[in-house]
């Protein structure tokens, strides 16, 4: 398979082929249909990366892989991105996406629900839980406030910007407690999809 694929690419990188064969511990004499799922994934990556792709498109690349193979796959994708290959992949494994992606698009029932930079998310997205002695106010109409949920004497506020302005408004409204929490990608996904569904 490697010899067959190599013949189509004048710029095939034999050094990358050799390095990945050794790194992935691929048995060169074994037939493709005799390889495990993890080995077949590694072979597919070798075939793609040795031809110096500008764009690599992967669909659920870690599906069915064991934890060691998943880690090797993620490291290979990080290395490919470092060599200026654009890596476009779909995955339901949010922790893996958060580890290696720069930008994320979230789909909900076939519709684009969000398109965001992970750096921006880490810097700006917050869950702010505000406690009051009595019934909470209904305000907090501040740019960046995406969703407010009332639970007893607490407000749970999901913000994509202006967290400091929300905190200041909470103090003006005589809050007895204000807890600002950074959001991970899983939290953002659940907030986005739940909001779209409501």
Image (tube, helix red, strand yellow):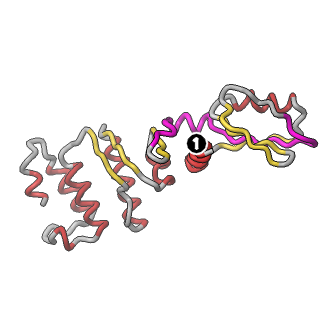
Is 197 one of the magenta-colored residues?
no
Answer left or right for 171 relative to 106: right
| Residue 41 shows up from this direction | yes
* Mark 1 Cα-neighbour bin, 10 Å: few <14, some 14–19, many ≥20: few
Closest to the observer: 195 or 170?
195
Q: Quadrant of residue 4?
A: bottom left
Q: Quadrant of residue 155?
A: top right
| Residue 184 shows up from this direction | no
> Is residue 89 depicted above or below 2 in this figure?
above
Mark 1 = which residue? Answer: 196
Image quarter hosting the N terminus: bottom left
User: Hey, which residue is sitting farthest right in the picture?
Assistant: 133
Image quarter hosting the C terminus: top right
The stretch of residues the image draws in magenta is 111-137
Answer left or right for 35 relative to 172: left
User: Hey, which residue is sitting farthest front in the picture?
Assistant: 198
Percent position (x, y) of residue 70?
39, 61
């Amino acid at each position: 398979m490697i010899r067959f694929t190599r013949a189509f690419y004048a710029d095939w990188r034999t050094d990358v082929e050799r390095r990945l064969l050794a790194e992935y511990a691929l048995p060169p004499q074994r037939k493709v249909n005799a390889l495990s799922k993890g080995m077949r994934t590694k072979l597919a990556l070798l075939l793609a990366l040795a031809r110096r792709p500008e764009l690599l498109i992967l669909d659920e690349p870690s599906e069915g892989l064991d934890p060691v193979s998943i880690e090797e796959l993620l490291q290979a994708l990080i290395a490919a991105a470092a060599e200026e290959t654009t890596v476009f992949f779909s995955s339901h494994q949010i922790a893996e996406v958060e580890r290696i992606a720069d930008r994320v698009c979230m789909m909900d029932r076939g519709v684009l629900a969000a398109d965001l930079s992970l750096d921006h998310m880490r810097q700006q997205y917050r869950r702010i839980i505000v406690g009051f002695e009595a019934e909470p106010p209904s305000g907090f109409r501040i740019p960046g406030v995406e969703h407010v949920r009332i639970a007893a004497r607490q407000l749970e506020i999901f913000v994509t910007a202006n967290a400091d302005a929300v905190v200041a408004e909470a103090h003006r409204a005589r809050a007895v407690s204000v807890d600002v929490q950074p959001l991970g990608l899983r939290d953002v996904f659940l907030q986005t999809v739940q909001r779209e569904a409501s």
